[in-house]
Image: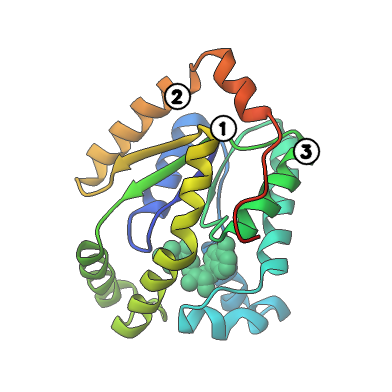
Amino acid sequence: MRLLMIAPPGAGKGTQGSRIAAHFGIPHIATGDLLRSHVLRGTDLGRAVRDCLDRGRLVPDPIVLEMARRALRAAKIAGTGYVLDGYPRTPAQAWAAYQVAAELGMTAEVALHLRVDDDEVVRRLLARAATEHRADDTEPVIRRRLALYHEVTKPVLEWYAERGILLAINGMRTIDEVTADAIKNLETFDAMPAVTHARIRSPLPRPCGV
Ligand code: ADP
């Protein structure tokens, strides 16, 4: 299973991504977690991206592309699929990810979209702020992350829909209900007829605006 997770902040990408990865026995690669780990360890990369993370801005494309490239290469060597969580987040990233994955013969089979509305996202992230103290979980930064999601990430969904690999599920239920629904749908999606898979493999036009 080669899976991308696309959802607003606070929709449960991390939680569902790791459960789905465990179910299918594949790595869960979360760009946000990787970046936060660099910040915590005080690496050069961590120092370079800290300010972007704290302000809820996107870190520069070459940094996340390199992370994704390494993770996809590692999955290829290990002979597994992957759950890529938090990348791509813009049409340009989607196009770059597609090219890198195509070179490796590892293009995504499914883009899973967890649908959660804005009020619920803000409520969840403020609740998380009270316990986890993530630097980007303050109300103004949450609003900025959400605005960025609507502006630059949502258009990516249309591109995956055109490609025939978009799977949208309702993320506004209990954690267990969402996991069960995602896994049930992914198992069916995985068993799609060969004709659909052939369409997935066919070369794609660049997304609009890239
Ligand atoms: P959320 O989706 O809840 O905002 P993440 O943990 O996925 O949380 O991401 C946290 C932060 O990491 C983002 O606000 C951004 O600064 C950075 N980041 C993660 N993935 C990317 C990406 N693909 N491109 C640019 N920045 C990213």
| Residue 133 in view (yes/no) | no
Quick one: label 3, few (<14), some, or many (20+) residues within 10 Å?
few
- Is 130 displayed left or right of 5 in the figure? left
Figure quadrant of residue 73 = top right
Beta carbon at label 2 within 8 Å of ligand 1: no
| Residue where numbered disc 1 is placed | 109
Q: Residue at x 73, y 67 (%)?
A: 62
Inter-mark Cα distance, 1 to 3: 14 Å
Inter-mark Cα distance, 2 to 1: 9 Å
| Residue where numbered disc 3 is placed | 104
- The x and y percentages for residue 194 are 58, 14
Figure quadrant of residue 105 = top right
Assign the C terminus to one quadrant of the image.
bottom right
| Residue where numbered disc 2 is placed | 189
Q: Give whichever of 147, 38 is nearer the camera.
A: 147
Which labelled disc corresponds to residue 56? Answer: none
Q: Residue furthest right?
A: 103
What residue type is disc 1 on?
Glu
